[in-house]
Image (cartoon, coloured by chain):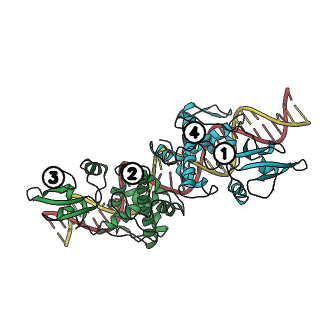
Chain colours: A cyan, B green, C yellow, D red
DNA sequence: ATAAATTTTTAGTCTTGTCTAAATTTTTGA
DNA sequence: TCAAAAATTTAGACAAGACTAAAAATTTAT
């Protein structure tokens, strides 16, 4: 049975691997977990002993298939809990991260599948991130950002890259949600901002920082 | 913010206080938590420093009002989670204890009240134990045991004293549930067993061990 | 009432996960 | 290429929570 701390390390390594960093270094892991590189080194040795990561001194770290499976299960747990909190308990999408961060570590072989069923087998969490299935299969974003859409085109919001509370609240303020339909009215080379029109609203000016953090699908 | 361990100690002390033991000794706490008396002494000092218990060396321990409030909140959390697991996730009542034992420690100021609402503000957990309200008010069992009911009388199961998996499974096997109506057909002085009749079933012989672990209300 | 038994506390150790500071290795750039 | 900078690891320390063994206090029983 893994400790919460060990699980958090696996999750961090997993997310760094996904972000296409060349190597998963102790520094990157330390940054991700707000801890120190020396602490990371210690923990990595333990995970390597348990065959959850491959580790060679000074060369960074890589999840073994076993480690990846565990990481995917934690991600699945986290995202299913987030759906529960939003759909069943009426939390706002900007309030659920920290709670899910705790709930994801609850140990049970049946709980998550039962929750999954209760929720109707959701495919995405409230931020649009895909939920791995029982076997760890996970759909990958096509990585089209709103910032790359051309004037005149229309698209639909699939998800967001930066799930910080601040960004989520910004989106809320302007009633931008998953599945919102957006048409690009204009783009400005000056600051790479864009004017967009979305359902039942006034035109909105979005900065590059915003538009490059929103995943979309052209329609 | 209290650790899980600290919370478990408060819960254990609370439950011993309720069981009308004269004094809450380190040995009793150790037994309750499957740990050693010396570990209990250490922890009690910490809780006393935090003003959650009153402690005098060799004299046992007593929850302060602050400690009691926290203990009641944990009990509330535990029992509400149990209702959730049974009502929403279709767990059996003999499967939920260990999971609730984990879930009760999730830290949130809003979660339990939202769950409570989702569940329709239940008054009892799946074993018939009363759920404290937001203010820590808790209904107390009237402590009438099935074993004290006389021949010919009818009563209804309110709850059970011993919530061990074994006992719950025994009750399940014989379809004895909360709210089951029971009529006492006969009692035997020899071993204090009784024959009972309950809804849609054959007469059943219950040992004293069983009948003295079932809370009932006469009707 | 007092010796024996029991309970409780203390002292010292261990494990987990963290940290700082120092040492070592790798990378960078002149 | 090789010295400086950056990254990584090692060594030693600490806090939390637990344990064992021994000491001290309390309770029990003669």
C-alpha separation, residue under disc 2 versus residue under disc 1: 37 Å
| Picture quarter with the N terminus of chain B | bottom right
* Front label number (3 vs 4): 3
Residue highlighted by disc 4? A132
CA neighbours of label 4 inside 10 A, class few (<14), some (14 to 19), many (20+): many
| Picture quarter with the C terminus of chain B | bottom left
Image coordinates for residue A92, horizontal then vertical, percent: 62, 58
CA neighbours of label 3 inside 10 A, class few (<14), some (14 to 19), many (20+): some
Q: Residue A155, located in which quarter of the rendered image? A: top right
Q: Which is more N-terminal, label 2 or label 3?
A: 2
Say whether residue A209 is left or right of residue B99.
right
* Front label number (2 vs 4): 4
Marks 2 and 4: CB-CB under 8 Å?
no
Marks 3 and 4: CB-CB under 8 Å?
no
Q: Is residue A165 above or below residue B141?
A: above
Residue highlighted by disc 1? A30
Bounds of the magenta span?
Answer: A119-143
C-alpha separation, residue under disc 2 versus residue under disc 4: 26 Å
Is the same chain shared between marks 2 and 4?
no
Mark number, residue B96? 2
Mark number, residue A122? none
C-alpha separation, residue under disc 3 versus residue under disc 2: 29 Å
* Front label number (1 vs 4): 4
Is the same chain shared between marks 2 and 1?
no
Q: Residue B71, located in which quarter of the rendered image? A: bottom left
Is the same chain shared between marks 3 and 4?
no
């Amino acid at each position: 049975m893994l400790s919460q701390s060990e699980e958090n390390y696996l999750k961090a390594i997993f997310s760094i691997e996904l972000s296409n960093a060349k190597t998963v270094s102790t520094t990157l892991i330390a940054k991700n977990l707000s801890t120190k590189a020396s602490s990371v080194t210690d923990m990595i040795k333990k995970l390597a002993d348990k065959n959850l990561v491959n580790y060679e001194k000074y060369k960074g770290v890589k999840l073994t298939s076993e480690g990846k499976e565990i990481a995917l299960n934690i991600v699945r747990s986290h995202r299913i809990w987030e759906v529960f909190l939003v759909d069943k308990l009426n939390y706002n999408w900007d309030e659920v991260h920290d709670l899910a961060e705790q709930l994801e570590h609850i140990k049970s072989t049946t709980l998550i599948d039962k929750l999954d069923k209760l929720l109707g087998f959701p495919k995405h969490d409230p931020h649009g991130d895909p939920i791995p299935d029982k076997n760890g299969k996970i759909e990958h974003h096509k990585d089209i950002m709103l910032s790359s859409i051309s004037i005149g085109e229309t698209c639909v919001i699939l998800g967001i890259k930066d799930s910080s509370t601040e960004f989520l609240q910004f989106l809320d303020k302007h009633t931008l949600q998953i599945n919102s339909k957006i048409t690009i009215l204009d783009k400005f080379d000056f600051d790479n901002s864009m004017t967009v029109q979305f359902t039942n609203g006034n035109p909105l000016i979005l900065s590059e920082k915003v538009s490059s953090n929103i995943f979309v699908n052209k329609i």
